[in-house]
Amino acid sequence: MSTSAPSHNQLDTKAEAWSALFSEPMSDLVKRYTSSVFFDKRMWQADIQGSLAHAEMLAAQKIIGADDFAAIQKGMAQITSEIEAGTFEWKLDLEDVHLNIEARLTALVGDAGKRLHTGRSRNDQVATDVRLWLRSEIDLIEGLLKELQLSLVEVAAKNVDVILPGFTHLQVAQPVSFGHHMLAYVEMFKRDAERMLDVRKRVNVLPLGSAALAGTTYPLDRERVAKSLGMEGVSQNSLDGVSDRDFAIEFTAAASLCMVHVSRLSEELIIWMSQNFGFIKIADRFTTGSSIMPQKKNPDVPELARGKTGRVVGHLMGLITLMKGQPLAYNKDNQEDKEPLFDTVDTLKDTLRIFAEMIGGQINPATGAKEGGITVNAENMRAAALKGYATATDLADYLVKKGLPFRDAHETVAHAVKLATMKGVDLTELPLAELQAFNPNIEADVFEALSLEGSLNARNTLGGTAPAQVRAQLAKHQARLA
Ligand code: ARG
């Protein structure tokens, strides 16, 4: 148990990690092809965290000495500061983050470093690292999803009484509250956050101790390692523990759904800010101009988010196909899980961050208030809601309340809409006498029912667009997100 640097048998290249069995070195092309260090080095913290927990347990179980553990701790502290300072030398020859850190540890502390890998394989090591890394990313994503929901809730709170046309088939359907519309997205992102938390439970399971594939001959205390890493359990089958990446697939599926929600919102923002709608403006810093058309302000951020959704869904396809057909247990195929997973995390985090700010604005340190979110043009929304006979259903409902069966009422209103269309007016602009010609039970109170406010207020059922309902939902979300 020496803590001084060894004079020989230090890992400098991968071939030396495998032993004397190999009679020829790898070609440069094969090295480049098989190495992952230039992307998996971002898991270095998880790698060190996992190694320290493993070493602590090895010492507690008297598999290595207490002085070995102390040396490993010291070496890992040194490596941490080297990586943080940017002086750590990552070597392609050492293939991946695991071998790079282990080789440096051995260079720093000698035999203790060589003892670290007792009862462990890179197969259970990498499975553990990916899980630890992903767990902390999920926690960041939870925070970002909350920020985005808060932004949407804030916009909703300011716009409960702002009315826009609700669409089905992108045809004017019925008037809705803009606050209600925003809260629809809050519901989506709330479910996304729940899905992430659910995925986290299955991510947060320890494979370490599975060793290469069959378990190990050393008396490991896996529960101890899980506990010290804050994991919720240990994998129950060594073959499964080292090989399945279903947790990464599940995460990417949850991320894909979240991006799909972002993409739907993006599509609406893009439509709403087109000149033909003019419902909203987004701050200039989220738009770009055109190099040829001086009048242009293009919604690049929402468009890119819509495009990046394809990228994340592509990663889901990549990962799920990667897993398909792999026999037990670990196969090198799994090294290909990292880039799609990393890119999914990066894309999702950036997207959520930028959307929270684009929608809700950012805090002005001078005033403490948020500024620079979307600007709502309530007049244009209202004008659009007044077009397209958005309250035709309300006339039908009015007639039903006067005793007409719904199907007959629907037909009657179709005739009224036809007449109004011919005259080029809204239903509310037809004189009472003309409306009464369709049904004698129609009275002067019909105009209130046909107004935008009347239409909204009438939809006062749970989950409906009546401002009273929207306010109740808002209060629930505000309490939940506080
Ligand atoms: N870099 C590898 C990966 O990402 C680590 C595990 C390698 N294990 C092995 N037996 N070659 O999966």
Image: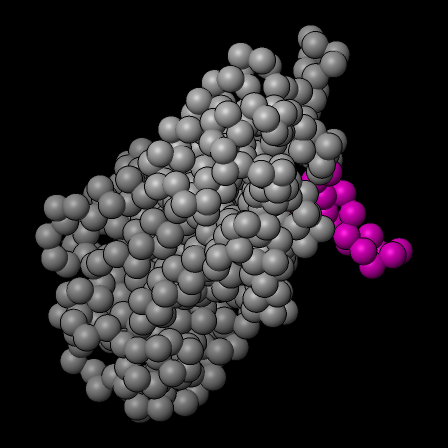
**Nearer to the camera, 209 or 349:** 349
- The vertical placement of 25 against 421, above or below, is below
Q: Residue at x 30, y 59 (%)?
A: 247
Horizontal and vertical percent position of residue 51 = 39, 72
> Would residue 449 appear left or right of 17 to someone viewing this image?
right
Q: Where is residue 6 in the image (x, y as percent from the top left)?
A: 42, 70
- Residue 366 painted magenta: yes
Quarter of image, res 451:
top right
- 299 or 166, which is in the foreground? 166
- Please provide the residue range marked out in magenta: 358-375
Relative to residue 421, is residue 235 drawn left or right?
A: left
Q: Residue furthest front?
A: 440
Check the picture and name the quadrant holding the N terminus: bottom left
Residue 428 seen in the current view:
yes
User: Can the viewer see residue 96 in this picture?
Assistant: no
Q: Does the magenta stretch include residue 221?
A: no
Q: In which quarter of the image is residue 279?
A: top right
Q: Is residue 293 above or below residue 235?
A: above
- Can you give x and y, in whole percent of width and height, for residue 427 in the image? 58, 27
- Residue at coordinates 33% horizontally, 36% vertically from top-left? 407
Residue 130 in picture, x, y percent from top left? 37, 60
